[in-house]
Image (cartoon, rainbow, N blue to C red):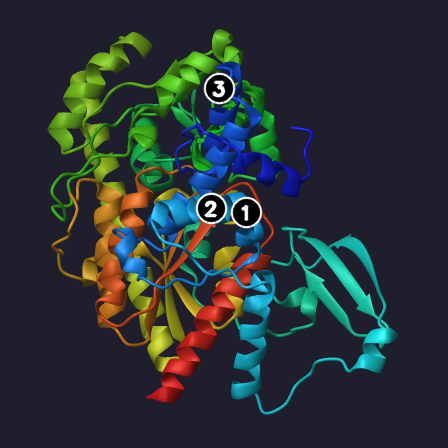
Amino acid sequence: MGFAVDEFAQVGIKSRSPVDLGSRCTVFMNSSIKQAQKDGAKIEDISAGLSISVVKNAIYKVIRAASPDDLGEHIVVQGGTLLNDAVLRAFELEMGRDVVRPAIAGLMGAFGAALYAMDNCESSSLLDLEQLDNFSHKSRSSNCKFCSNNCSLTINTFADGSRFISGNQCQRPLGVKDEKKLPNLYEWKRDYYKKMQGRPGPRGKIGIPMSLVIYEQAPLWLELFTRLGYEVVFSQLSTRETYERGQFSIPSDTICYPAKIMHGHVEELLDQGIDLIFYPSLTYNVNEKAGDNYYNCPIVAYYGETINGNMDSLAEAKFFYPYLNINGERALTRTLYSNLQEIDPTITRSELRKAVRAGFAAFEEYKEEVRQAGRDALAYAEENDHRVLVLAGRPYHVDPEISHGIDRLATSLGFVVVSEDSVCDLAEKIDTRVLNQWTYHARLYRAALFAAENENVELVQLFSFGCGVDAITSDEVRSILENRGKLYTQIKIDDISNLGAVRIRLRSLIGALEAKDGSN
């Protein structure tokens, strides 16, 4: 807006009518600011509105104070953000109190870290003044060649010849050789999906995008359509190119990345000449009797509508997104039969009934294999004294382009990795403070209970940026874990693949666990 940051802050101090911009993420905030400009808001009112938003977000969504009284009577603030006078004033107005801001507010965190290090470290690897005077380093970019991931690496070389490498999804670029491969349910699932192949059938080909609900139900639809005489063609596991292939038909930047990436999967199938593409519309998931209800989230349930309404490339193909009920063979047969008549009237109800029965059998077999793989991983961890990490999210979080190698990073740090659906059956149904109405969330809560009740098991929640319902699940999972003495760790993932922050988060978790074990 033509101001330096300090100037922008001073302008905000003069505001008499701050714009209400809410306290949401920057994507939504940007839209709100543009709308405020269209409505004629002054610069000072936008500046003040932003400062108020920052303060409200910090107090009520980060600190999670129920009221200003939770922060006490006498308040000292720290951090570089509070050097902004407009933010400081917004904080005082929200608290209804005068607060103290030291002149060194922006450095107080660094001083605190230094004091903590002095009290807890016997020796230091910090450079002395002479070494700092002579400090130099060079940086270059490269690609790792150890596997097909081809991680983009940043290699920093220092004057003494030492190197620091970032961007890697495992330890191999760091020179760690002969690393023992630990059980990893995410990798197990990806291998399972890669092996799923259709076979030629008399009714032609049907394409299924490997995204959202298909990441769990692929065995069901593969067997069902194969029995009906179709050759099932799945799109490949996602890459960055998958996203880029479909990005121009995405109607909203605020939708979660797992949904955005589906556009690329559909484009991939179209590029293969597939003229019949299937994605089911499922208001309800399978009833696992573990919650108050068993909905799919609206994105998983109805994203077929978005695909059909926004992808012009589907004009020459048939996109088949029928509304179905998958709670039992009869329900699926009834709802699928009438829709299939539009595709191929020669399909008989008897033929479909047999195909549905075979599909559910394959689905149940897959789910039992997942549970057994989870039990095997837990047994391995116990026999070999490894920590277990429940990497908990949704079935589609195993997608390599969505999880960005977090599971492989976790195993490289010594964790045996299991998924929420591989262990949730080992915990009882749990009473929650919120309405437990989503199938995937009910699994998440039970997986959290399992982690909380087992000493050597930790849970990290994967949180897709843009997922509105996870604002509810994160609080509930935190409560389940912390009320039972366990640590809660959350990792937000989107289309950013740099694992630096994730590595810090996981190593911090390990450090906290080791400190906790030492204190015991």
Amino acid type of the residue tagged 2 in the rendering:
Arg
Neighbour class for label 1 at 10 Å: few (<14), some, many (≥20)? some
> Going from the N terminus, do you reach mark 2 or mark 3 first?
3
Q: Is residue 327 left or right of residue 213?
A: left
Considering the image in quadrants, where does the C terminus appear?
Answer: bottom left
Using the image as rendered, state which of residue 325 and residue 157 is in the foreground. 157
Secondary-structure class at tag 3? helix
Q: Is residue 50 left or right of residue 133?
A: left
The answer for how far apart the CA atoms under marks 2 and 3 are is: 25 Å
Q: Residue at label 2?
A: 89
Considering the image in quadrants, where does the N terminus appear?
Answer: top right
Question: What percent of the width, then of the height, locates residue 391?
Answer: 38, 58
Question: What percent of the width, then of the height, locates residue 43?
Answer: 57, 26
Using the image as rendered, state which of residue 75 and residue 315 is in the foreground. 75
Q: Residue at label 1?
A: 85
Q: Are marks 2 and 1 in contact (CB under 8 Å)?
A: yes
Q: Is residue 435 above or below residue 81?
A: above
Question: What percent of the width, then of the height, locates residue 174?
Answer: 68, 69
Q: Residue at label 3?
A: 35
Amino acid type of the residue tagged 1 in the rendering:
Asp
Secondary-structure class at tag 2? helix
Neighbour class for label 3 at 10 Å: few (<14), some, many (≥20)? few
Rendered image: mark on residue 302: none
Q: Is residue 437 above or below residue 37?
A: below
Neighbour class for label 2 at 10 Å: few (<14), some, many (≥20)? many
